[in-house]
Amino acid sequence: MAELPPSTSVRRWLVTTNHKDVGILYMITSLFFLLFGGVLALLIRLQLWVPGDQLMSGLAYNEAVTAHGLIMVFWFLSPFAFGFANYLVPLQIGAEDLAFPRLNALSYWMYVLSGVLLGISFFQGGTMDAGWTLYAPLNVPAYTPSIGSTGAILALAMFVVGVTASTINFLTTIHHSRAEGMGLMDMPMFTWSILATVWMMLFAFAALLGLGLILASDRILGSVYLSATEGGALLWGHLFWFFGHPEVYIVFFPALGVMLEVFQTFSGKRLVGRKWVIIAIVLICIQSFLVWMHHMFLTTINLEVKTLMMATTIGISLPFDLIVFALIYTLAKGRIQFTTPFLFAFGALLLFILGGITGVFLGAIVLDYEFRGTYWVVAHFHYVMFGGATALIGGAYYWFPKITGRMYDEFLGKIHFAVFFISFNIVYFSMFMAWETPRRVFSYNQDFIQIHQFGTIGGFILGFSFFIMFYNFWKSYVSGPIAPDNPWEFSRTAEWAVESPPPLENWEGRPSYASGHLEFLSDDHGHGHAPAATDGGHAHTGNEASDYVLGDKHASHASIWPFAVSFATFVFLLGLSGIRQAMSIGAGASPLDIGVTISNPMYPTLTLLGAVGMLYAGVQWGLEDFYAPPAEIANRWPFDHVEKNKLGMWFFLASDVLVFGAFISAAVFIRIAAGWGTWTPIPDQIFGLINTFVLLTSSFTVILALVFARRQHRTGLVASIGATMLLGLTFMGVKAFEWYEKVYIDGVFIGSVNPDLPYTAVQASVYFVTTGLHGVHVLLGLIVAAFLLVRAYQGHYLEDERPVEYFGLYWHFVDIVWVFLFPLFYLF
Amino acid sequence: MMDLFALSHTGPEDWRAQAAVFEEIFFVFLVIGTLVGVIVVAYTLYHAYKYRDTGKPDESFEPPILGELPTGDEGPKSRKLFVSFGLSAILVISLVVYSYGLLLYVEQGPTDDIGSDAEHAENMEIQVEGFQFGWNFEYPNGHVEQDTLRVPQGDDRVIRLNVTATDVWHNFGVTELRIKADSIPGQYATTWFIPEEEGTYLIECFELCGLGHSDMDGEIIVMPEDEFDEWYEGTMEDDETDDDTNDEANDGNEDDDGTDEEGDN
């Protein structure tokens, strides 16, 4: 399985884990979603042709509006950017691939199949129609009952899982696999922008995943978080925008990275104020999490908080000012070549300036009060997001020769730019002229008819302009002139130092910047061939010495399990989308007396098949002999001497911490909204006490397991893993009894409570869902522990005890989360 | 858009309609924003034109070399960068501080202790409930009207709106009066306006709320005071004939339904 089939075969694309292949897959797939989202946009514009025109029914219009936003933000913009990131980041930092190649392929397949799930949702009674912002309680089944609405949410959740995997991958890669001599500050600006993007993604998408799980729980399990009058709607607002604001920078930063590269390459000048630009980028990352309430100025948040958010919002515009000026001044004294990539990057800057200025308007609360829910907001974010993304189009032209080995047609490229730039401004500037139109309506003031029609014509031309690029790329790929390694006069980053396209493992020899510039060294491990630099045995500096002793095994590049796991997940979620409507479970007087009526067997069957498939494919993944060697010699600051997989595990746990953070914040928020003192603990303290003791003991046994593994003591290892599992099962058993008591004896359900009891329905929801999520984590840990148990019995982990260590880290994390949940739900 | 100078000179001197406040701030931002935009864009285009590659050889030109460690340009251009950055920061902060001063007024609305109560007409507080897909207005006397809000004209009175929702998240907005409030179930958001000019003002919903979001319109009718009073009394009679039980309950609460406060018959 380690050998890659040729790129002309379909099988190749299903099994590849190479970052360049995955990058190409992302780029092409995302362009398909651009067309999908674009067609929806044109449908919206057609509906706006005259006020009240009923091209689509009101509901269909809302679905179009919702899907347009979701597709463009999630399924087009970031994947397109990450197509470039996948292809170029390893090349720019001198690595051979991403840190976790199979995980990378998994991210892609999760992305594609989640898009298919979204597409299917249109046919399940209509997709979600609550806007891409999915405000509560419009997003709960009482108001959006279709199965497709649930399907769309599950599609989004699946997408976020893939994104999280990507985040962990890029963070580990950029922090672990940089070439010798390339410190963090030495990285190219495109890689810097991706690093900033993935740091923000780590925290932002974790919040969205938590929120998505809350919504899925409300829709499928019947909890009542979001319909609760004790702040359910505002809970959504806070959590969504806590994610939503960093998200817009997550979308923009890769485009900014392209601008920073392209401005330098085509002016022949180095970036002015580079150190300050990097500092500004880092500041924006942090500040992006402090401004979210500027999307909520008209809600009932108090004046002090509003003022604070206004200040932080203005504060975040300042680093952007610096970056914009740095780009402008970089052009000074340069020799600017107006190639297509530069035209698009330059155009992106102009559009971003205009969009940014209108953002300052929105930051002034009094003005925002009137702009709320109008086309001013729509025009603003299209200028900054789509305008910024214009630079990504420039990036497509810039790196087209590198990726395909052919040169694109420069004249057609310039035509594309002209048509694009003019039509872009026609559509979106017209929105400023008619800004008083409310969002997401098709009945509007008669005075604006001509303006909207003008904009619609621009929209069609804008859509058409993309086909100029598609034609150019297709024609050039098939019969364009062969491109050299480096077609650009003043480029300097490492991707231009290898062939176009690069070979499978990127480099002949090991790239190193230790001498101050790029060299390809050959090392003793038989890795490289002809040394391209002076001496072969390079002296190791202190913090870049090799952390690994590796054999001569050849790196793997192919695996079917990422596709298999993703496909099984797709089937599982497809089943889950309709399960509430397809089944009714009548709970009787005892757990033995449950009546299950299945009206549509398809959904439960799919759910079951999918779950089994996920388990099977997951086990096969674990058993597969896939060799992805870490870079032997690399600059890993600030994570020196942290082993690759452990670093990945830490990033994963950080993300999981944030997911629980979202749930705990939700619990606290609802409780404060209801009145903190009005809640008394639902479960009996004794069960919580027992389970705390059980879990803490299990942390001890898991440490014991690691000790035994290190001492190569097989019996001890098997026994401690077994003991951990036993304790974990005890935990689940105690929890099952606790829940049995609540549901069957007291009458506390996930979405309703026996009226004689002093608990509210939302309090019950919060209790069941939060502790339930923790329970799911324990269950998943038990599954992994079972896998480890079998393998330990077979004699593994005595030479290489790392999997036991990683499992231990995860298990400790689960226990620590419990230490927070216990007082919150059992004591106070 | 409303005429900047037409309003705000007829009521108590420091009372300004939200519309007037908005127009002023918007005008200032628009002028400065356009100026800044034009200058920055022109400056950028100028740079792009001036430093285009003319093909002439230049010995002093030191471009980046393939394979070099990425460094920046740390020359004199960095100083220009900080000057530009500083100027833009001062400008942006000043704009927002200026608008903040007016925010405090807009949040509260005009206060009532201008002169004595007898000199100008009473203010009114209306409970607004958004629902799928219309607006309910509850007057102080308990009368509920759907989709149409009638208020008496008067440039020295304030109408306060207490806005909530019964089902999903809506947004109550009247473009011509420049007022808006989120309409959220379980929450009460407030806004206010001065009914200075007679006329009909369109209410629209500014938050996607379902199938009928696009048609969720209403209207505010500012009518002459005496016509309003006649209509308002009529609502109480209608309510009496419509529902005797309610009326008996109301009789015990005369302070709440406003009957004692009418002084201008």
Image (tube, coloured by chain):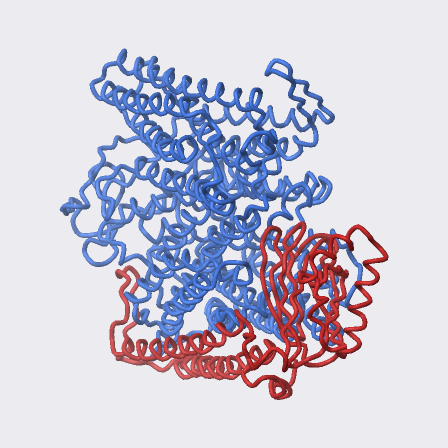
Which residue is most to the top?
A: A715
Q: Is residue A73 above or below residue A341?
A: above
Residue appearing at x 62%, y 51% in the figure: B185
Q: Is residue A714 above or below residue A318?
A: above
Q: Is residue A185 left or right of residue A167?
A: left
Q: Position of residue A739 (x, y in %)?
A: 51, 23
The one nearer the camera, A322 or A266, is: A322
Which residue is most to the front?
A: B252
Q: Position of residue B187 (x, y in %)?
A: 58, 54
Residue A482 visible:
no
Q: Is residue A254 above or below residue A362?
A: above
Q: Position of residue A815 (x, y in %)?
A: 35, 29
Q: Quadrant of the C terminus of chain A?
A: top left
The one nearer the camera, B180 or A464, is: B180
Q: Position of residue A619 (x, y in %)?
A: 45, 23
**Quadrant location of residue A477?**
bottom right
Residue A83 visible:
yes
The chain assigned the colour blue in the figure is: A
Q: Is residue B261 left or right of residue A748?
A: right
Residue appearing at x 79%, y 58% in the figure: A55
Residue appearing at x 38%, y 64% in the figure: A261
The chain assigned the colour red in the figure is: B
Residue appearing at x 60%, y 34% in the figure: A751
**Quadrant location of residue A486?**
bottom left
Q: Quadrant of the N terminus of chain A?
A: top left
The one nearer the camera, A475 or A66, is: A66
The total of numbered circles placed on residues is 0
The one nearer the camera, A625 or A683, is: A683
